[in-house]
Image (cartoon, rainbow, N blue to C red):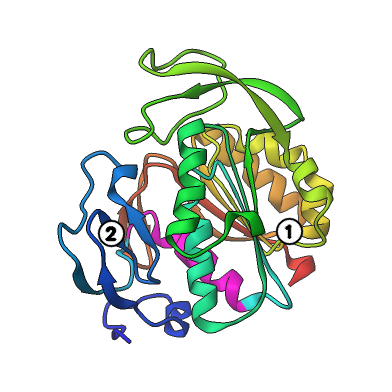
Amino acid sequence: MRDFENKHHEVFRHFKCWEGIVQPGYNVDFVGAITRASFYKGSFCYKDPSFVAADYPEFDEEYFPWIDVLESIIAARDQFVMMELGAGYGKWLVRAAKALREISNMPYLLIGVEAEPEHYQWMKTHFLDNGIDPKNHLLIEAAVSDQDGHVMFETGRGDEHYGHQIIIDVIDPSLSIKDVPAISLHSLLNSLDKVDLIDVDVQGAELKILTAAKDELNRKVKRIHIGTHNSVIETGLRSFFYHMGWQCLNDYSYQQECSTQYGIIKFDDGVQTWVNLALE
């Protein structure tokens, strides 16, 4: 296990850094989740089979979802359940599964919701690449909204763009627009008894999606990690969760350079983490 001279969060002590052979065309993270370089145009990959001794994640915007994933795993009982809304290729779901399997044989359920067609197919591929059978989990090709139905949604340029969103105004003419199914968080939570973690990255729809599912969140969800997309949404989320009595663990603003306990970090999306004290 790597040392902690860089003052990593204590939760990382429970998880050793992965070592092994990475095949050409892939890269790998510290829990051993491999990712196809083709998912990101111009991204790094190994050109030949290579032995890799991975290290803990860097202190950047993605450090905080790592903490939320790992702490949720440590706190899980009986079954680990995680939901990723605006899942892309399911990066955080797969990372959670790999981290869980390192320390436990606990059963787990992964729920990924993604409306962009290419990213949705990549999510299934990413599961299989990492030894996870998509048929044992719930992967849904849909946009997440405040109610069930259909919405207009951006699609296209999958290896360049991960900010697809429900369309109100056409922002990027290089993207196509498609009518897609929409599913509410209320419907997603309806058949579940509890959820250890929801990761939300829905490009500006986060406040309306969460507020529409208030009762289900209070009854069933232990922790939420949110990527935020403007200051109005951030203020609304603070009010929403404070009034429900949830505890704020992280609150860093969209498009800001913020002082954190890990140093100065530039945030593209903002980050908020909320814990449901009633379910702790």
The location of residue 203, given as percent across then percent down, is 51, 34
- Which is in the foreground here, disc 2 or disc 1? 2
Task: Name the residue type under label 2.
Answer: Asn
The span picked out in magenta is 60-74
Residue drawn at x 64%, y 76% as measured from the top left: 75
* Apparent side of residue 3 relative to residue 152 in the rendered image (left or right): left
Given the image, on which type of amino acid does mark 1 rest?
Val
Q: What is the C-alpha distance between the residues marked 2 and 1?
A: 32 Å
Quarter of the N terminus within the rendering: bottom left
| SS type, badge 2 | strand
Which residue corresponds to mark 2? 27
Instruction: Residue at 53%, 67% (x, y): give it.
Output: 97
- Magenta stretch: includes residue 68: yes
Residue 26: image location, x then y, percent: 28, 57
Q: Earlier in the sequence, mark 2 or mark 1?
A: 2
Dot 1 corresponds to which residue? Answer: 221
Q: Nearer the viewer, residue 249 or 21?
A: 21
Q: Badge 2, how many Cα within 10 Å: few under 14, some, many 20+?
A: some
Q: Nearer the viewer, residue 164 or 20?
A: 20
Local secondary structure at mark 1: loop
Residue at 38% across, 33% down? 158
